[in-house]
Image: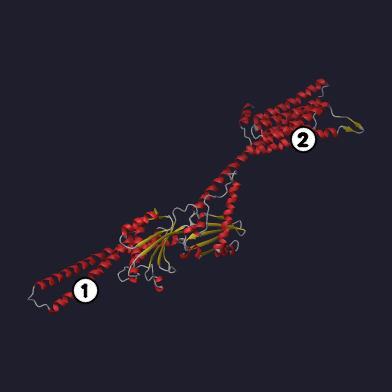
Amino acid sequence: MKPAITHYLHQDETLPLIQLRRLGLIYSSYRFIVGLFSMLMVYITAQTGNIVSLPSFLQQTVLSFYILLSLILLGLFYVVHKKMRRQLAFGLVLDVTILSLLLYTAGAPDLQLTMLYMVVVAASFMLLHSSQALIITLLAIIFVIYQQFFYAIANSMNLANLGNALLMSASFLAVGGLSWSISYRLVQLEKVAASHAKEVERLNVINQEVITQMANGVIVIDNQHVVLANLAAHQLLSLPYNASISLPSVSDEADSSTRHESYTELLTDFEQQLSKQHTQLLHACLSVSAGQSCTFTYDLPAVANASIFGKLRVHIIPLKDGSKLIMLEDLRREQASAQQLKLASLGQLTASIAHEIRNPLAAISQASQLLMEDVIEIEESNTADENMVVGNSNVDLSGNYELYKMIFAQTKRVNRIIEDVLKLSRQQAASQQSIVLAEWMPTFLENYFQGHDVFLRVKTQPTISFDTHQLEQVLINLINNGLRYSSYAQPHAYVEIEIYCADNDVIIDVLDDGAGVSTESLKHLFNPFFTTDQAGTGLGLYLSQAFCEANQTRLLYIPEHKKTCFRLIAPSADAGTYGSMNKKNVNKSVL
């Protein structure tokens, strides 16, 4: 028996404070209502037939005192949030005392008071610690048995009343045990539910972070409205995004409502911008029937074409609750994979034949140089010998010299082509660094183009992430092309470089006054070995585009520009909050 009681007392599990307060308010209200009802019933039942018998002074005093204290305890429990269990314990002791006095005035146990006693006992085991509840139960038993003995001494011994009192006391213990068992199970269920809620919240936080960090855009549409859109969806569609607003949290009840309202406003704004700038995409997503999946390629409109993304693959996946999951995939990665495969194939080819080509090429180049030196020596010896007749031999030697010179020049050109191809095959993964263009570009121009007319105009202070060596190679190639082709059309060759921002991208325009690229040549412009210059290798733009793609940047030719314009479009490295870029400097007329 003793180990069972000890185990019982150690199994002290109580309700959480939030539920304790809720149940405490309910029980305090119940106490006040019971007091009023008891007072009312005393006066209603006082009239029996034509005789009116007023309740005793003890009944009136006890009930009046009970109603007053019940009202005070209700107001105190509602206002004061501290020491709630002490307040409840005092109220339950008061209940036991008042019911014992009422039981004494009744003279014998009755059903109504017994039920009220059991409610008090059950409430004590649900609201208080088990030890406190046991004390209140024992107090109720003592009061019931003692008042029966006192009543028997004052009046006469009635074994039936004493037996009823003992049966009532045993009922108290039974109700207390059952109430404790139910309360214990409820507390355990609450703990399991709280544990599950924390686990769900943890998984929710993980899901939020995963969705936010995904490279693919995620949009969920339910009942023709957007209910979820991650950062990548905003970026891929060039729509503003406030990174300070996160998904509403379940555990954070303090500002959960405010955060939910802000997030709803963000989704509403996203939906409006989506319907305005990407009407075709939204209509295509909404037109897919429920329960059906669909995949298509979406071309970004001209307004969003300033972004580094040209095409998106859209996957529409139906969900079980009837909503639609829309995945936006950037086709850049496929293009980059294809580019890597192309470069790998080219690298294998060049690695196998470069050595075989360059050895005989070096022999031809060396032989042509030796023949040119022989011609020069023969001409010098003929000039020194005044008596020698030189006639047709001088003409032959001069013609041979030009042929040897042509062979030597072509071998140098072939060697330069091989070197450019080897650059493609040997290039490693881009080692990107943060580059502040307003500081880096003047230093670059001073190092490589000092003495040339290259004019720089920086409209913002952007930062990009790029491999510095590869960016140098790209700009050197573009600027040299601009100077060369500008010299063909103008007596004074010069190149202009403009740097500005468009949405979340940094734009670098390389401009010249050359003749530009013809319509027939546009489709072959970035193909390897395509050139319109006899002295060119046809690998400069191809190599530059490969470097740009390795750094998540696009290299485009802009035929709509009034000048010859090659444009680099790189994502801004300092655009932490999407849409926070200073758009005052964006030149919309050239996009």
Location of residue 412 (image quadrant) = bottom left
User: In the displayed structure, would residue 201 be above or below residue 52?
Assistant: below
| Color scheme of the displayed model | secondary structure
Does label 2 or label 1 sit earlier along the sequence? 2
Q: Residue furthest front?
A: 492
> Which residue is the site of mark 2?
34
Q: Residue furthest right?
A: 50
Percent x, y of residue 221? 58, 58
- State left or right for residue 3 relative to residue 26: left
Closest to the observer, 230 or 154? 230
Mark 1 crowdedness (10 Å alpha carbons): few <14, some 14-19, many ≥20: some
- State left or right for residue 404 relative to residue 116: left
Percent x, y of residue 219? 55, 57
User: In the displayed structure, would residue 425 be above or below residue 61?
Assistant: below
> Which residue is the site of mark 1?
403
Label 2 to label 1: alpha-carbon separation: 122 Å
The number of numbered discs placed on residues in the rendered structure image is 2
